Image: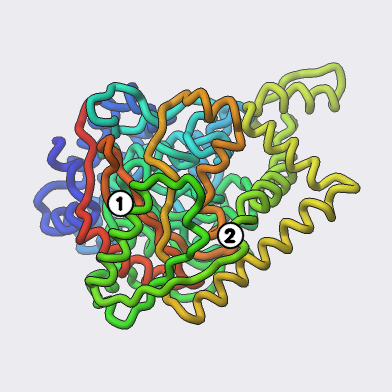
């Protein structure tokens, strides 16, 4: 059975089409893997075996009839932020206790329309707020990777930690995820997987629990670049229900893999060489440059001068939007309700009991920066900085096709790291290389590029022009071919 779960999406798709095994067999293999491993890894908060086998059976019938879709019979995990009809959807928060929507998110509906099979819902930081998957109501996810000679449990990154861990541990063939400030790319880097945050508007946000509406974007986490390209092709679409989704044809991303990089210009931003950056990250970055040069690309030094303001601006804009979006969780219509002496008391009691510490912190920050007397000083100024960050990239993209940068300031750290737990700002610094992409609405991809001295995976980030995800896949494929793919030693 484990041989089936080791197949990539591309490999499984080919073997299903050749009728070497059935979709039901593949799904059963994944369900068995989840049953064996989930207690140790905590990637899934809900498993849906009956639904999965029913969908797989329907896939087998379509394959037999010659009507297979692009993802026919491929078992996927779904981040708990995506609404799934009649299935647990809680954003891993107590405030949404027992909520099962009567509708399906556009992104997951696109996947099911292409024949994919749902295995269950994946763990995440509560309301996607976090960089370590430790703020989930369902407890932290454990990274399938461990440092050489150590038994210490490590974080998988956040907020899409369950998605990244499940893909790395072969508990699904691929997974949906979301990225508001790095929540696809950072977990992908920590787990040796591939993650792409598409251009803002490439995937519909309808049916995805909102964190920061002008920054959130759905994307896939997969085992390799080809699988990520296959998944994004199915996930992306224009949607009448989401006015921010863009009506631009979705290309065949997979077809760009293996194309020459001759003539491509790669930008190296000097501002990403931050103070105190580990030598290993610097070396990995230089190695990435060398691989792209060897493939025929030209490397150009560029400047993104407003990068240093991106993190503080992000941590004003995102909490402000979160404060507004999370006001709807009041105990009146759905989810948790804690009774009080009157309706105002019921609101207060419900929100106090339902939201975790990190979500409360961000709501308080957001409410503060939006309050009278502070709106101009904080929120309005942050939006102006955001415009300048976007402008920096626009100017850079006059000279280059893509930007190569680090993705994380380190490899995965320990669950319960005391230093990070004591100082939230240090945790926020995990996003230092990723938030600029969200602030500018650009596509960004994380590709595994090597292992550090502890034997833990490190990734490199490619940033592209709006709606030019194909360029990122093409360049990432070159890095992947040079670096190889990485798999954790099985301990679960």
Horizontally, residue 91 falls left or right of residue 68, namely right
Q: Quadrant of residue 394?
A: bottom right
Q: Residue furthest right?
A: 373
Most foreground residue, 146 or 223:
146
For the residues labelled 2 and 1, the Cα–Cα distance comes to: 24 Å
Asked if disc 2 and disc 1 are in contact, CB closer than 8 Å, the reply is: no
For the residue pair 479 and 162, the one nearer the viewer reads as 479
Q: Secondary structure at mark 1?
A: strand
- Tell me the tag on residue 307: 2
Q: Is residue 245 above or below residue 278?
A: below
Residue under the image location 62 percent in, 27 percent down: 356
Q: Is residue 299 left or right of residue 106?
A: left
The crowding category of the residue bearing disc 1, from other C-alpha atoms within 10 Å (few below 14, some 14 to 19, many at least 20), is many
Residue at the location (51% across, 49% down)?
A: 275
Element assignment for label 2: helix
| Total marks in image | 2
* Foreground label between 2 and 1: 2
Residue 54: x and y in percent read 31, 41
Q: Dot 2, how many residues are within 10 Å of its Cα: few (below 14), some (14-19), or many (20+)?
A: many
On the rendered image, what quadrant is the C terminus found in? Answer: top left
**Quick one: quadrant of the N terminus?**
top left
Which residue is labeled 1 in the image?
Answer: 448
């Amino acid at each position: 059975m484990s041989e089936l779960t080791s197949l990539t999406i591309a490999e499984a798709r080919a073997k299903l089409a050749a009728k070497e095994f059935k979709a039901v067999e593949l799904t059963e293999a994944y369900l068995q893997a989840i049953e064996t491993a989930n207690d140790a890894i905590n990637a899934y908060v809900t498993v849906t075996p009956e639904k999965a086998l029913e969908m797989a059976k329907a896939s087998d019938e379509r394959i037999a009839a010659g009507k297979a879709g692009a993802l026919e019979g491929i078992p996927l995990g779904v981040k708990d932020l995506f609404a799934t009809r009649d299935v647990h959807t809680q954003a891993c928060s107590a405030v949404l206790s027992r909520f099962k929507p009567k509708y399906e998110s556009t992104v997951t509906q696109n996947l099911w329309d292409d024949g994919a099979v749902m295995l269950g819902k994946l763990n995440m930081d509560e309301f996607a707020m976090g960089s370590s998957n430790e703020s989930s109501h369902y407890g932290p996810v454990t990274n399938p990777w461990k440092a050489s000679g150590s038994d210490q449990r490590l974080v998988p990154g956040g907020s899409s930690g369950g998605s990244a861990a499940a893909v790395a541990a072969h508990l699904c063939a691929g997974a949906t995820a979301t990225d508001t400030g790095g929540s696809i790319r950072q977990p992908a880097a920590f787990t040796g997987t591939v993650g792409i945050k598409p251009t803002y508007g490439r995937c519909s946000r309808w049916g995805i629990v909102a964190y920061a509406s002008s920054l959130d974007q759905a994307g896939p986490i997969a085992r390799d670049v080809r699988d990520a390209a296959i998944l994004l092709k199915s996930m992306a679409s224009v949607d009448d229900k989401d006015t921010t989704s863009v009506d631009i044809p979705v290309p065949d991303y997979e077809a760009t893999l293996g194309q020459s990089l001759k003539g491509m210009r790669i930008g190296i931003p000097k501002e990403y060489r931050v103070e105190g950056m580990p030598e290993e990250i610097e070396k990995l970055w230089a190695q990435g440059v060398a691989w792209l040069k060897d493939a025929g690309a030209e490397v150009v030094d560029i400047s993104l001068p407003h990068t240093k303001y991106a993190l503080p601006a992000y941590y004003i804009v995102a909490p402000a939007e979160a404060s507004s979006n999370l006001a709807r969780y009041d105990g009146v219509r759905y989810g948790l309700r804690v009774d009080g002496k009157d309706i105002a008391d019921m609101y207060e009691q419900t929100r106090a009991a339902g939201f975790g510490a990190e979500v409360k912190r961000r709501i308080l920050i957001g409410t503060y920066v939006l309050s009278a007397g502070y709106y101009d000083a904080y929120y309005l100024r942050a939006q102006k900085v955001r415009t300048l960050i976007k402008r920096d990239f626009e100017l850079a993209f006059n000279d280059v096709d893509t930007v190569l940068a680090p993705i994380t300031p380190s490899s995965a750290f320990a669950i319960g790291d005391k230093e990070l737990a004591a100082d939230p700002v240090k945790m926020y610094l995990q996003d230092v290389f990723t938030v600029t992409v969200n602030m500018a609405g650009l596509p960004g991809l994380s590709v595994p590029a090597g292992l550090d001295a502890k034997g833990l995976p490190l990734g490199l980030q490619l940033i592209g022009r709006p709606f030019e995800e194909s360029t990122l896949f093409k360049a990432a494929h070159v890095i992947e071919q040079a670096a190889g793919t990485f798999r954790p030693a099985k301990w679960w």
